[in-house]
Image (cartoon, helix red, strand yellow):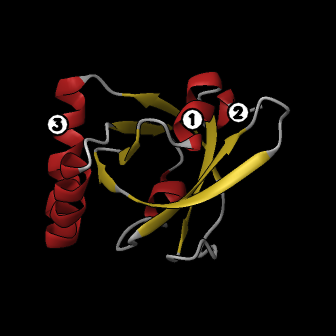
Amino acid sequence: MQKAGLEQFVDQKYLSLESYRKDGRAVATPVWFAQERGIFYIYSLADAGKVKRIRNNSRIRIAPCDARGKLKGSWVDAEASILDASGAEHGHNLLNQKYGALKRIGDFFSKLRKRKRVVIAIRLTAPENRT
């Protein structure tokens, strides 16, 4: 795994998640993330575009960014997967620890509006596996 790729995310609040439409066009979205043992966790509404794109193509790129999506580092190739219930609970716990009250307020309103959420795990791909 590319260590320099991981180091650029230390102390960052946002990452830009670049996923791909069926026609190959890239769509970048700034998201909150938590990282543990080289795995990045993000969450999203289940019907969001990025989730639909990841279901169709798990290959993505990530880079540290600010809240508006302005890059603060370089792109790194990665694979994304939507987690099952136990993995999602772990991801939410990590995100709650990092973002505290702001995350919990968002969770409250999501539950109030009965909006289904998913947690996505992101793993950097090894340089020799990149295309």
The nearer-to-camera label among 2 and 3 is 3
Verify CB contact (< 8 Å) between mark 1 and mark 3: no
Look at the numbered disc 2 and give the secondary structure of its residue.
loop
> Separation of disc 2 and disc 3 at Cα?
30 Å
Q: Residue furthest front?
A: 113
Screen quadrant of the C terminus? top right
Q: Nearer the viewer, residue 49 or 94?
A: 49
* Residue occupying the point 59% across, 42% down: 49
Which residue appears at 52% of the width and 77% of the height? 66
The numbered disc on residue 27 is none
Label 3 sits on residue: 89
What type is the residue that disc 3 sits on? Glu
Q: Earlier in the sequence, mark 1 or mark 3?
A: 3
Q: CA distance from mark 1 to mark 3?
A: 24 Å
Find residue 102 and report its image quarter. bottom left
Is 8 drawn above or below residue 18 in the view shown? below
Query: In the image, what residue occupies the spot 63% across and 33% down?
Result: 53
Near-viewer residue (75 or 91): 91
Residue at mark 1: 125
Q: Is residue 7 above or below residue 50?
A: below
Q: Residue at x 25, y 41 (%)?
A: 114
In terms of sequence position, does the residue under pointer 2 or pointer 3 come before the other? 3
Mark 1 or mark 2, earlier in chain: 1
Please state which amino acid type lies under the numbered disc 1: Thr
The residue that disc 2 covers is 130
Q: Is residue 16 above or below residue 84?
A: below
